[in-house]
Amino acid sequence: MAYNWSNDLQTGNMQIDTEHKELIKAINNLLEACSTGKGRAEIEKTVNFLSSYTKTHFAHEEVLQKKYNYPDYNNHKKYHQSFIDTVESIREKILANGPSIVLVGEVNSKVGNWIINHIKREDVKVAAHIRNNTK
């Protein structure tokens, strides 16, 4: 199942929304590769991208949160670190045992779902806080 960008994922911050779209695109590319029997070949590339890109993306979000004194910054940062740890765990499994369909499923369930839920539950609150404090 591919993830679709929808209005409920928009934070209203162009940089953050653009970066979120890139994360979703990476997951969708992996899922597309799986549907054509190429998931094992694509997973390492996807996980390496997610490992690098999420750190950059989270740093951008955290700079904004600090700039606008987001009150739940510490918890939000913990969510980010937990996600980074999850991606790194999957990456370590790939390095140790090679790509597998099980790991593709893990990326889909633990990574893809996390991104969508995090945007809907947490990032929209950050964006609202920024909007309310820039008027």
Image (cartoon, grey):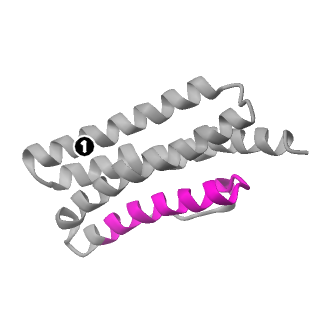
Which region shows up in magenta? 8-32
Is residue 28 on the magenta stretch? yes
Identity, as a three-letter code, of the amino acid under mark 1: Ile
In the rendering, at what x and y percent does residue 7 appear?
Answer: 69, 60
- 106 sits to left or right of 76: left
Q: Residue at x 16, y 42 (%)?
A: 93
Q: Quadrant of residue 65?
A: top right
- 39 sits to left or right of 87: left
Residue that carries the numbered disc 1 in the rendered image:
90
- 34 sits to left or right of 6: left
Residue 49 visible at all: yes
- Image position of 18 with respect to 91: above or below: below
Callout 1 secondary element: helix
Q: Residue at x 67, y 33 (%)?
A: 66
- Image position of 125 with respect to 31: above or below: above
In the rendering, at what x and y percent does residue 51 appear?
Answer: 34, 48
Residue 1 visible at all: no
Q: Residue at x 77, y 38 (%)?
A: 129
Q: Quadrant of residue 42?
A: bottom left
Which secondary structure is most common in the magenta stretch?
helix
In the rendering, at what x and y percent does residue 107 appear?
Answer: 32, 50
Q: Quadrant of the N terminus?
A: bottom left
Crowding near the residue tagged with mark 1, few <14, some 14–19, many ≥20 C-alpha atoms within 10 Å? many
Q: Quadrant of residue 88?
A: top left
Q: Residue furthest right?
A: 135
Q: Quadrant of the C terminus?
A: top right
